[in-house]
Amino acid sequence: MKVGVVGAGLVGATAAYAMVLRGSCSELLLTDLDAARAGAEAQDIAHASPVSHGTRVASGPLEALAGSRVVIVAAGANQQPGESRLDLLSKNAAIFRDLLPQVAAAAPDAALLIATNPVDILTDLTVRLLPGRAVLGSGTVLDSARLRWLTAERAGVDATHVHASVLGEHGDSEVIAWSSVTVAGLPVAAFMAARDLPWTTDTRAEIEAGTRGAAAAIIQGKRATYYGIGAALARITERILADRRAILTVSAPTPAYGVSLSLPRIVGAGGVLNTVMPLLDAAETAALDVSAGVLRAARANLAEWASEA
Ligand code: NAD
């Protein structure tokens, strides 16, 4: 099964590398405006193939995406220190208006998995540009992983046994859905009490700050984030290819909020199959409304939505 990666920068190349190491697909095609970069990344990643899963890795022009079942889009500008994801909107929207119709024409059967920021609004823009196409954004899959990891550290367990969702914007207004966090099937507070571990307002505030501030902290230290998102993109892609019906907090158009944002979704062949609204308390429900409002307000800066502002 073939997967395409458009934008072979740090995020796209790391996703491709993760897919080779995990054996996510049989064939990978990297393409970038900077053909030399895509070629060099493809060559470097291909050298991991014989010692991992034997994936065929190549680079080429957009037309070489033909036959892809999933295309990951990670093309565009990334955040500079001090910049928010929403600051990237006009630059990356301009790239998408030109690029996405070409990607869709080159890979007519592919689900489009958007990673470029601001990912929620660019998911909406892609849906607007390409009606009828399977489109989803990586959304808060990465943020949920950060929340799970930080909670697991406190719980003293393997992070794969923590279930937790970050909802709403992949960005500053994202919502930590504490009501639905479980460890070993127990509500997190019950798990911590059973193990005699601290679980206070301060503990939650620290985890929340660590989740929300992770990207800024990493960008401050090494200029970009890519390993976490690379693994998340590999995971989402595998779930689509294998029609796994996995629950992932990907971003997709959500009529109740009038914008693309992240909620737990059932992901399989064709992308998002359904949405599973978690049980939220009143504060979480209100915070999700605020997050949706932030996204709608930012999206109104795009010409496509100007009349709705
Ligand atoms: P990067 O600068 O390393 O790579 C971006 C690549 O896009 C470059 O190689 C550039 O040549 C290419 N590109 C630009 N315009 C193009 C076009 N029209 N056609 C083809 N290729 C084009 O940046 P990065 O660190 O890989 O980040 C990429 C995007 O991913 C950014 O928007 C960043 O904010 C986002 N990101 C998203 C998440 C997430 O959770 N969704 C996490 C990290 C980064």
Image (tube, rainbow, N blue to C red):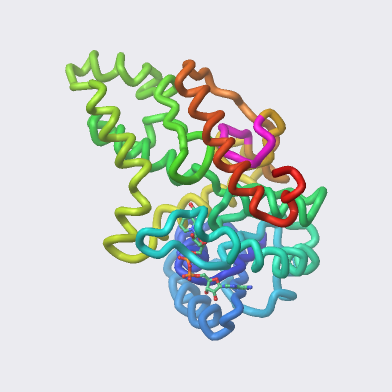
Indicate yes or no whether the magenta region holds residue 29.
Answer: no
Q: Quadrant of residue 184?
A: top left
First to last magenta residue range? 257-266
Count of marks overlaid on the render? 0
Residue at the (70%, 62%) spot, across then down: 68
Tell which of 171 and 61 is nearer to you. Answer: 171
Quadrant that contains the C terminus: top right
| Residue 217 percent across, percent down from the top left | 30, 53
Residue 281 vs residue 33: left or right?
left
Residue at the farthest bottom position? 36
Q: Is residue 280 above or below residue 94?
A: above
Quadrant assignment, res 251: top right
Up-down: is 168 above or below 83? above
**Residue drawn 35% across and 41% down?**
211
Residue 17 shows up from this direction: no
Please tell me which residue lies in front, 194 or 208: 208
Depicted 201 relative to depicted 152: above or below: above
Residue drawn where x is 35% and y is 24% of the image: 183
In depth, the one of 208 and 152 nearer the eye is 208
Which of these two is toward me, 306 or 52? 306
For the N terminus, the quadrant is bottom right
Please name the predominant secondary structure of the magenta segment in the image.
strand
State the image coordinates of residue 126 (x, y, percent, origin top left): 71, 54
In the picture, measured across the screen, residue 247 lies left or right of residue 52, that is right
Asked whether the viewer can see residue 72, the reply is yes
**Residue drawn at (42%, 59%) of the image:** 83
Residue 159 x/y as whole percent: 34, 37
Image coordinates for residue 210, horizontal then vertical, percent: 30, 41
